[in-house]
């Protein structure tokens, strides 16, 4: 999956989202999110390898699609990340779930390991709408994996991606087994909320930024779980979607979306 255009994807159609929200078209919005989640999960568990070839901008939904491929062959000059917080929402196309799976899960499987630094890393990367300015930086952020490839010459990108897909198929590719997600529960939810509050009190983020961060923390904690629990991917996907729809109904989120559409810049309201 790739493109010869300058950019792979600049994210979701914000105009469609904000108009649907303002007109109360919640069933349509819910359906659109479910379709993106479904697309990404089908790619992840496809019996045939799906190679994603991002270049240029791969933001928001473009980043989520990239992370759900069987393999990534990325142009070195790829600007990629989950930027939804700038539009007043959280990643809901399986992006939050995937950050949890990639960054938090490995630590949670180690007996007696301290998971907080990894939860904090995922929380801050999403909460600060962090964008990797190169494919190699994306690898350090967990967006690209150790087996993913980086191509210096953009002209060779799609050719190399096709070669990778054919090689994987010929080598007897098998999709990964379904994986549970580590949800740290209520205590970690409180810790993340305190972190967001401290950022707000230090004037690093606005009060509404803190509100969005609390929604993100609720999803990453696994909701109102009383203790750390391993949950299904679908469980986190449902929390993602509910948080996204809830935020779309808020005037300040809608104002952020219109600001990006009209000025190209996020609104710090």
Image (cartoon, helix red, strand yellow):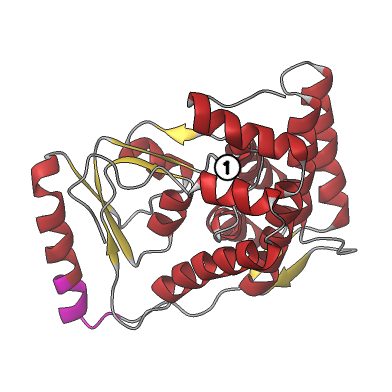
Assign the C terminus to one quadrant of the image.
Answer: top right
Q: Is residue 167 left or right of residue 205?
A: left
Residue position marked by numbered label 1 in the rendering: 84
Let me know if residue 111 appears in the view.
no
Q: How many marks?
A: 1
Q: Is residue 144 left or right of residue 82?
A: left
Tell me which residue sits at (36%, 47%) in the image: 9
Q: Relative to residue 52, is residue 157 depicted above or below?
A: above
- Image spot of residue 130 (x, y percent): 52, 34
Viewer-proximal residue, 229 or 27? Answer: 27
Tell me which residue sits at (12%, 65%) in the image: 163
- Image spot of residue 177 (x, y percent): 48, 80
Determine the image quadrant of residue 75.
Answer: top left
Range covered by the magenta-colored residues: 166-173
Tell me which residue sits at (86%, 64%) in the image: 225
Q: Which element is circle 1 on?
A: helix
- Image spot of residue 108 (x, y percent): 66, 59
């Amino acid at each position: 999956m790739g493109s010869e255009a300058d950019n792979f994807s600049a994210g979701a159609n914000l105009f469609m989202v904000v108009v649907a929200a303002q007109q109360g078209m919640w069933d349509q919005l819910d359906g659109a999110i479910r379709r993106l989640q479904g697309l990404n999960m089908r790619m992840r568990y496809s019996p045939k390898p799906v190679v994603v070839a991002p270049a240029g901008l791969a933001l928001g939904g473009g980043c989520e699609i990239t992370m759900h491929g069987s393999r990534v062959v990325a142009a070195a000059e790829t600007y990629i990340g989950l930027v939804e917080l700038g539009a007043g929402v959280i990643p809901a196309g399986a992006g939050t779930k995937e950050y949890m799976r990639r960054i938090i899960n490995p630590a949670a499987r180690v007996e007696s390991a301290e998971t907080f630094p990894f939860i904090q890393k995922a929380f801050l990367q999403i909460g600060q709408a962090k964008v990797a300015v190169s494919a190699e930086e994306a690898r350090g952020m967990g967006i690209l994996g150790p087996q993913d490839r980086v191509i210096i010459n953009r002209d060779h990108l799609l050719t190399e991606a096709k070669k990778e897909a054919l090689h994987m198929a010929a080598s007897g590719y098998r999709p990964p087994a379904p994986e549970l997600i580590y949800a740290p529960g209520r205590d970690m939810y409180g810790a993340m909320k305190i972190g967001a509050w401290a950022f707000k009190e230090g004037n690093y983020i606005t009060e509404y930024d803190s509100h969005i961060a609390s929604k993100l923390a609720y999803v990453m904690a696994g909701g109102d779980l009383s203790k750390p629990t391993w949950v299904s991917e679908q469980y986190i996907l449902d929390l993602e979607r509910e948080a996204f729809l809830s935020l779309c109904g808020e005037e300040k989120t809608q104002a952020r979306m219109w600001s990006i559409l009209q000025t190209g810049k996020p609104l710090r309201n």
